[in-house]
Image (cartoon, grey):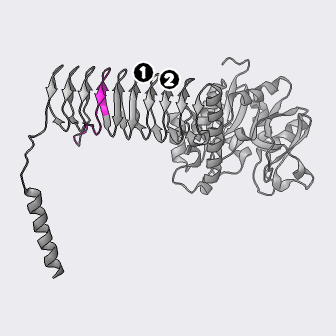
């Protein structure tokens, strides 16, 4: 995205995550299958932000590693003395930057690009932009003292007067200013307040004292939900899922019971797909037009072709690619399986590390035995092959096009095209054995009673 003025972001991620009660830092917990830090990083990049500094605590080793993997610059805040102090910790990393800087929070994952663009657009008329919202319950949120959209001050709830606590518009924490204004104002922030911390919010009055105008940009409450504990995380997940469900249905997807379908951040579903109740999509799923997903399916890392039929009770794992008109039925699991046009795996089967051609029929209870305890091996099944029920295909093995496998076989050798493979021992019937067995058991039962 082209922007007239250079943009940078400071992502605050130095909290100790104590309320999350987790060995993993709070900002690495996922919403929609994606860590919150990744959400905020993606937001910044999608908004054309070229420089991103992640402010972390010295003990947040996992956050530091994640930030490095995302290609972010890292600034250490130790000890943590408030948001104003956190922004100051990023000053050195942006010492050569001359442009607009937005302060984001790694535990606020759902802000949209249009909302953030609104923050930057505010610089056309103002020197400072603050993202505000109107919650149902303002509670402990800081209040925005405004006159229209002109912002006069941000008052922390603990510092607010009874009259100020009646204000309905609240502070999300997100704000933006020029690098010079932001860091210059932060240099003048003090910790003379109830918490003894350096409040970033104090820069509003500092900049206004320099005759620099501040404004409020409005956001929906659902976008600025902050996450402090597991309850907040569940609320953020619910807000995300609501948006995804509504977007899916508006784009032509049928959800039979929307509240029971769960999407990941990157789920892609084309129009005229039908999804029944209790379906979970993990990351990396694309579903093409005309497909039907029946109830109780879990799908991750999978591409589902046009007019495919999935489930009920199917589990599709990463690396599964289903061509058009395929069927993967009840209690079937696939993993790294390429399934050709019109092929069917209808019942009670596991197909992993496999490549199936077109028009293959896999009978109930079939297993591709892909793991020898050390390595994975591949099964290849040619076009039009028929695999009988309860077949075990011991990889590496190739079943030729048009071949037939008799039911109940353990196939350990390649099968030529159009051949019939019988890989089970000859049945032996022992006449009268059942009657003799029962007689012996009855005698033992009577002996125990006596």
Q: Closer to the N terminus: mark 2 or mark 1? A: 2
Question: Relative to 310, is 313 above or below?
Answer: below
Which residue is drawn at the image coordinates 41% and 22% (left, top)?
325
Segment tinted magenta in the rendering: 352-372
Q: Position of residue 226 (x, y in %)?
A: 68, 45
Q: Position of residue 80 (x, y in %)?
A: 66, 51
Which residue is drawn at the image coordinates 62% and 34% (left, top)?
244
Tell whether position 270 is magenta: no
Which residue is drawn at the image coordinates 86% and 46% (left, top)?
168
Q: Is residue 402 left or right of residue 428?
A: right
Q: Nearer the viewer, residue 223 or 280?
A: 280
Residue 85, located in which quarter of the rendered image? top right
Q: Is disc 1 placed on a helix, strand or loop?
A: loop
Q: Where is residue 345 in the image (x, y as percent from the top left)?
A: 34, 32
Classify the position of the N terminus by image quarter: top right
Q: Is disc 2 placed on a helix, strand or loop?
A: loop
Classify the position of the C terminus by image quarter: bottom left
- Residue that lies at the very extreme toward the bottom in this rendered image: 450
Q: Which mark is residue 288?
A: 2
Q: Are the residues at dot 2 and dot 1 in contact (C-beta closer than 8 Å)?
A: yes
Tell whether position 358 is magenta: yes
Which residue is drawn at the image coordinates 42% and 21% (left, top)?
324
Residue 422, located in which quarter of the rendered image? top left
Residue of label 1: 324
């Amino acid at each position: 995205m082209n922007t007239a003025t250079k943009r940078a972001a400071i992502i605050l991620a130095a909290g100790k995550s104590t309320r999350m009660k987790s060995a993993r830092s709070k900002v690495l917990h996922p919403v929609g299958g994606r860590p919150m830090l990744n959400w905020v990083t993606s937001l910044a990049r999608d908004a054309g932000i070229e420089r991103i500094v992640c402010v972390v605590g010295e003990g947040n080793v996992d956050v530091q590693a994640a930030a490095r993997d995302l290609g972010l610059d890292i600034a250490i805040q130790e000890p943590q003395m408030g948001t104003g102090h956190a922004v100051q910790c990023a000053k050195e990393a942006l010492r050569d930057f001359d442009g607009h800087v937005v302060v984001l929070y790694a535990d606020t994952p759902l802000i949209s690009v249009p909302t953030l663009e609104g923050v930057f657009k505010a610089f056309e008329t103002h020197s400072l932009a603050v993202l505000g919202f109107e919650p149902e319950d303002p509670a402990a949120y800081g209040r925005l003292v405004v006159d229209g959209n002109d912002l006069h001050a941000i008052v922390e709830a603990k510092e607010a007067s009874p009259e100020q606590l009646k204000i309905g518009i609240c502070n999300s924490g997100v704000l933006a200013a020029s690098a010079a204004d932001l860091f210059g104002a932060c240099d003048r922030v003090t910790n003379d307040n109830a918490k003894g911390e350096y409040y970033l919010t104090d820069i509003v009055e500092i900049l206004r004292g320099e005759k620099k105008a501040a404004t409020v940009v409005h956001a929906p409450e659902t976008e600025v939900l902050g996450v402090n504990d597991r309850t907040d995380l569940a609320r953020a997940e619910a807000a995300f899922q609501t948006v995804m469900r509504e977007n899916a249905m508006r784009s032509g997807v049928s959800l039979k019971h929307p509240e029971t379908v769960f999407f990941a951040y990157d789920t892609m579903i084309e129009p005229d797909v039908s999804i029944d109740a209790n379906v979970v999509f993990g990351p990396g799923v694309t579903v093409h037009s005309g497909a039907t997903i029946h109830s109780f399916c879990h799908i991750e890392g999978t591409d589902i072709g046009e007019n495919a039929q999935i489930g009920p009770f199917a589990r599709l794992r990463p690396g599964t690619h289903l061509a058009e008109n395929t069927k993967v039925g009840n209690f079937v699991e696939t993993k790294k399986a390429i399934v050709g046009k019109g092929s069917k795996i209808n019942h009670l089967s596991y197909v992993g590390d496999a490549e199936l051609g077109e028009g293959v029929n896999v009978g109930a209870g079939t297993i591709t035995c892909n793991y020898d305890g050390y390595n994975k091996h591949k099964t290849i099944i040619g076009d039009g092959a028929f695999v009988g029920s309860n077949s075990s295909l011991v990889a590496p093995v190739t079943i030729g096009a048009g071949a037939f496998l008799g039911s109940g076989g353990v196939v350990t050798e390649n099968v030529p095209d159009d051949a019939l493979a019988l890989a089970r021992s000859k049945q032996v019937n022992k006449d009268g054995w059942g009657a003799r067995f029962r007689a012996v058991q009855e005698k033992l039962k009577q002996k125990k009673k006596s």
